[in-house]
Image (tube, helix red, strand yellow):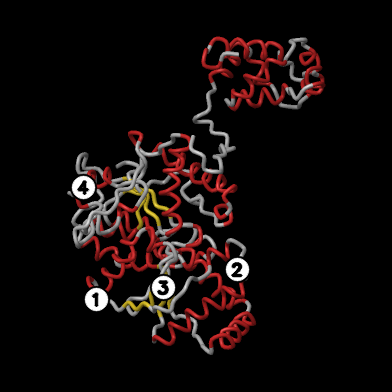
Amino acid sequence: MEKFGFSLQKARVINYDSNDRSIVEYVLEREPSLKLCIECGCCSAACTTGNFTDFSLREMHILLKRGENNEVRNKIKKCMLCGKCILVCPRGVNTRNVVFLAKQAFQKYSAHAV
Amino acid sequence: MVNEGKKRVWSDYQKEIADDHFFYVRSCIRQSFYPGSEQFFLNFLRNDLGKDVYENPSHTTCTGIGYHGDIVPFSTTQTVVARHFALMKESGYKNIAISCVTSFGIYTEILETWKHFPEELEKTREYLFKATGREFDIPENMAHTSDIIYKFRNEIAAKIKYPLINKQTGKPLKVVEHIGCHYAKMFPKHGVGGAEFPRVLSGMAEAWGGEVVDYPERRHCCGFGFRQYLVQANRGYSLSNTVKKFESMRPYEPDLVLTNCPGCNMFMDKWQYTAKEMEGMTFGSNGQSIPVLTYEELAGLVLGYNPWDLGLQYHMVQSEPLLRKMGIEINSEDKYRTKDGRQMPIPQNLINA
């Protein structure tokens, strides 16, 4: 890269046309309860990992649905699969399975390997 | 809506453009970066259409770049513009033809200010008289040079030699038009088609056989932004804006970008080079960049002027792919040769060359 003394900032628009939704489609096919998520954030409030790090399951769900996978791929490693989020979810989403399937999908599509 | 009503509504979006006797005011950067534009305009109006266009050698900058860069106070800008009006009065002209969209924005802003705050007008008259002893009148008609070319677009279409049609496929060339923010976004009534339906460039492109591309970021800024550009560390904002616009037009594979404003032309042209150097990005079809032309350069091309006389070689993105599509014969040896046959230095790292 040439040194110009300034840098290019990535646009912050969510481009649903170019974003890759293959991961969320893989998850939704196997765990349709994710469709019931209302993004209330109870999972994040109950999350032990979230208490000590910047991990937020609600954020993961939103980013997955948008197809913004890069951030999810790194942060999802922090989940310990304890399952406290399932106990508090008012919509009955199997959140632990969502995390598990997302990890599996990242492994499956080598471009996104965790 | 009945047809009569439609016509009445559309007439509200039109502006009156003078027919003859223009007091021409120059841009700060246009002659340096795209010298063929101004030459075409003056030559076409004076020699082809037989119009009276006067240029006063005492004309100066309008201070627009300094004003929008927050380093020139508004009262100074008003007095400088008042001096231009005084020069026009002394030369005996009443119709002003402004060749830069930044200047056009400054002139419209000042005229609107004087209309709503007459005390500012009186103050400016006083400042100008004290400083220079001059007096001025407000112009009867104010047009941007693109308005004038738009007015005579059908005269150009009647003499057309190379229409905007791809000679290989027979389809119209896809034109992205960019009118510039200061043309009609600030004071819509001063632009053809207002802020909602700017027609000045799309009217030209369609009259000359092209097809206008309607893409999501069509009305987005070119990225100039004055303050964002003047400080080097902030130029990323400017570049990011341009890249956002170009990424939006990329799927439509435009053949050329047609610009209204010297600043927009410079940024849409040169930032394509920068984006390519920094990130390897290109926005045209087949991994090429998109040539960016002024409306005068395009008018000259369709009329059959020599592309090198129009100064197309001074752009960063070279226009050879477009010239081939239009079926214009070019002599590469003459590209960097002066009229008297001397060889000029050949620039490096040109795009599409």
The secondary structure type at the circle numbered 1 is loop
Q: Are marks 3 and 2 on the same chain?
A: yes
Image marks 1 and 2: residues in contact by CB distance under 8 Å: no
Q: Position of residue A57 (x, y in %)?
A: 72, 21
Is residue B194 shown above or below A41? below
Whole-number angstrom distance, CA of label 1 to CA of label 2: 39 Å
Whole-number angstrom distance, CA of label 4 to CA of label 3: 34 Å
User: Amino acid type of disc 4?
Assistant: Ser
State the residue position of label 1. B50
The secondary structure type at the circle numbered 3 is strand
Whole-number angstrom distance, CA of label 3 to CA of label 2: 20 Å
Is residue B1 shown above or below B316? below
Q: Are marks 4 and 2 on the same chain?
A: yes
* Apparent side of residue B225 relative to residue B149 in the rendered image (left or right): right
The secondary structure type at the circle numbered 4 is helix
User: Amino acid type of disc 3?
Assistant: Val
Q: Chain of mark 2?
A: B
State the residue position of label 3. B25
Q: Position of residue B141 (x, y in %)?
A: 43, 77
State the residue position of label 2. B72
Nearer to us in this view, B206 or B148: B148
Disc assigned to residue B332: 4
Say few, some or many: other residues with alpha carbon within 10 Å of mark 3 (under 14 / 14 to 19 / 20 or more): many
User: Which one is closest to the eye, mark 3 or mark 1?
Assistant: 3
